[in-house]
Image (cartoon, helix red, strand yellow):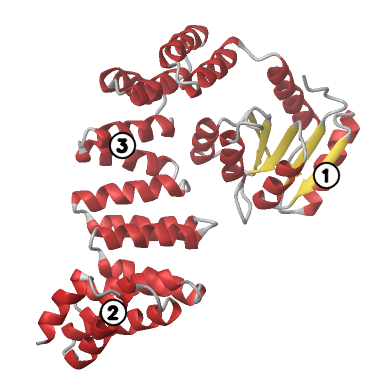
Amino acid sequence: MIDLKQMSVLIVDDMENMCKSIRGMLKVLEYGSKFRFAFNGAEAWAVLQKEPIDLAIVDWNMPTMTGVELLARIRDDKTMRDMPVVMVTAEANYEIVAEAAESDIDAYILKPLTVKSLGDKVAEVVEKTNNPPPMAFRLKQARDLEEAGEFEAAVAELNKAIGAAPDSTRPLRELGKVYLKMGDFTEAEKCLTKAAKLNKLDVAAFHALGELYLKQDQIDKASKFFDKAVNISPRHVGRSVQFGKVLIQRGEVRKALNIFDKAISLSDNSMSVQEEVADFCLEEDQNEYAQKNLEFLSQQMPSRQDIVYKLGIANEKQGQYRKALGYFIEAGKRDRDNIDIQLKVAKNYIASGQVLRAEQTLNSIMRKNPDNEHAKELLKQCL
């Protein structure tokens, strides 16, 4: 149980004055006895991992991990996922509403804040946390059962949650997702389709429908629903990347690459997203795009030998053997005992007409590993 007057509160906003203003309002209300500040989502996450917090009041739009991204981490963490979170936002546009529904925000408040609006919302959220309404209680029960692998029992709890709140799409959506995990695509489709019809902004339902059709190799349908989800909530980077991958598989390369570019630009961890996209494109033979991103990553992380090696692969696939050779030689300098890299060097020497150098490299490999069949085959090409 959270004691409204004694609770610990984490206030997260990139403006220090706003943090102090919220703390001042809470003190006027006599809500909370311990206050912590964080000036972006990453700082807030560090605080949450060090000490228990009863309530978080979080700004929606921040650099270095947005409020929604922070909330997603909180909800994915079993030790803190039930902590109440109040989101503060400057405007109530449809994108915020969609993200609020998807990320399980307990409440959101529009700026400018007043003592009354903040006090009413915080009191309401704490009361619901201490005494959850029937639907919320059933949803948590279902979640715990699902995580324990008791899917049938989870389905029963979710049906009770639907009965407790028949106008809410969330129990329907969650039921569909459980059926999806069970492999019951027919029931999953029924639940998710109904949830999407009831709430045109239920982005999680659209995304789950995309996953359902992807599992059934119905790429056109999957693409349709991923597209809807991305249009509702474009800041969800992981969803955009997944949709881009689906489009690549459909052959809609130009649209996919535009989506990848947008996802990278929106991400607060852009290099991680860029590397994921580059690796995927390398596997799918979108080598020019992979090369462009790998070149950027190599500039930013010059010590990464594996990125240099991937650049060699990207150029080799495009027939740019001399350029590929340069990357493989550089990668080999950093990892001199790697036979696979040495074989790549030899192969690209041959492809670029430098047979004597290929032979020297292959003989070096054979001295270390006389039974290397790949080296033997390449030596035949040097004769």
In the rendered view of the protein, which quadrant contains the C terminus? bottom left
Identity, as a three-letter code, of the amino acid under mark 1 = Ser
Q: Which mark is residue 225?
A: 3
Residue hosting label 2: 365
In the image, residue 363 above or below residue 232? below
Q: Nearer the viewer, residue 326 or 124?
A: 326
Mark 3 residue type: Phe
List x then y, in percent, for residue 81: 62, 31
Q: Residue 49, how many percent across, how many down?
A: 71, 43
- Give amino acid for label 2: Ile
Q: Do the residues labelled 1 and 2 touch (CB within 8 Å)?
A: no
Q: Which mark is on residue 21?
A: 1
> Residue 120, how many percent across, how many down?
76, 25
* Residue found 26% across the figure and 19% down from its top: 186
Residue 320 seen: no
143 w.r.t. 66: above or below = above
Mark 1 and mark 2 lie on one chain; the one further toward the N terminus is 1
Name the residue rendered at 54%, 39% in the picture. 96
Q: In front: mark 3 or mark 2?
A: 2
Residue 21 shown left or right of residue 293 in the figure: right
In the image, 154 versus 373, the foreground residue is: 373
User: Which tag, 1 or 3, sits closer to the chain's start?
Assistant: 1
Classify mark 1: helix, strand or loop: helix
Q: Looking at the image, which is closer to me, 43 or 254?
A: 43
Q: Where is residue 211 in the image (x, y as percent from the top left)?
A: 32, 35
Q: Residue at the spot x=85%, y=37% of the render?
A: 25
